[in-house]
Image: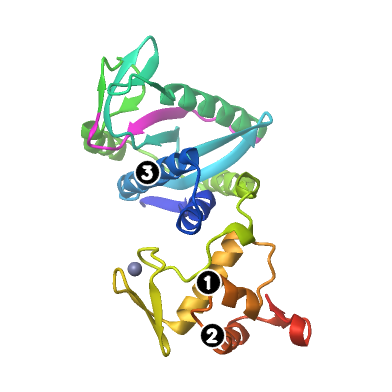
Amino acid sequence: MWSMILKERAVPLELRILKLLDARTELEEKEKKYLHNKAKGYEGEKMFDLFTGKLSLPSYLLYDLLLESNNSTFQIDTLMITQDPLFLFEVKNYEGDFYYEDRRFFSLTTKKEIQNPLLQLERCESLLRSLLQSLGYRMMIESYVIFINSKFHLYQSPLNQPIIYPNQLPDFMSRLNRRSSTVNGRHKGLAEKLISLHQTESPYDKYSKYTIDRIKKGLICAVCHAFEVFCFGRHLQCGVCGYQEGIDSAVLRCVREIQLLYPNEKITTNLVFEWCGGIITKQPIGRVLKQNFCAQGVKNHTYYV
Ligand SMILES: [Zn+2]
């Protein structure tokens, strides 16, 4: 037996939206910063997955859960269900020098206070505990803040706090592997219950000001997001990084972009034509839509689902 991933980590919807908006519009400064932090956080979580995914301790792994308890929403980066306890991990990809003072975290360079991950962890654990109780599970919870970035340093680091620093991580993982655990149907049942309670985020309200008419049209490169994409017959090529793409794939990518940013828009040949800035002509767009989607409506009002 080994650790088994029951819920994979997907690129957060908000991160996908922000990346696309960043390419097609001018984001506000605070949104750019948020995008940067969000991308960095996700990167850190994926790095930690490489450790947990390799554990030989029998356990169920749930990556990235959004749950509700006592009318509060809370997010869990990584939950590992072993026979006992339940491991709760809050992953931080902070980079650079920080210091700890009066139970608070500060950046050494800017002297600005940053969010206290220990408080975040405490909140998460207490909400999880009450959720488990309401589901009829009484299990111990062991929680840790994982600082994953090897360039992170915390001066005046507090003793006796559930923090794992990057250089401690390999040892911490080996210690986990030496524990004993037998998971059974009841543990799997809990994992499945939590997955069924997982909520999907809906960040659309936050970015509703970026309406479809405000956004820059044109075909962006699938790799570097540059707008310099040129069409040669059935192929397209990026003038910046040289990436080549078939016309069908580019049309489908446009459709996915529209569906991601504007899920309520009806997909029509004209809309995709406008979206790609006229770089692909309507004839191949219509053909690809017909081949890959189901046509609804009649004649000039055909849309695809
Ligand atoms: Zn490119």
The answer to which quarter of the image holds residue 36 is top left
Q: Which residue is mark 1?
A: 254
Looking at the rendered structure, the secondary structure element under dot 1 is: helix
Residue 74, labelled with which disc? none
Q: Is residue 238 above or below residue 231?
A: above
Front label number (2 vs 1): 2
Badge 1: few (under 14), some or many (20 or more) residues near its Cα, within 10 Å?
many
**In the picture provided, is 2 more to the left or to the right than 10?**
left
Q: CB of mark 1 within 8 Å of CB of mark 3?
A: no
Q: Earlier in the sequence, mark 3 or mark 2?
A: 3
Q: Residue visible at 46% across and 40% down? A: 29
Q: Is residue 280 magenta?
A: no
Q: Amino acid at mark 2?
A: Thr
Q: Residue visible at 44% across and 25% down? A: 115
Q: Is mark 3 within 8 Å of ligand 1?
A: no
Looking at the rendered structure, the secondary structure element under dot 2 is: loop
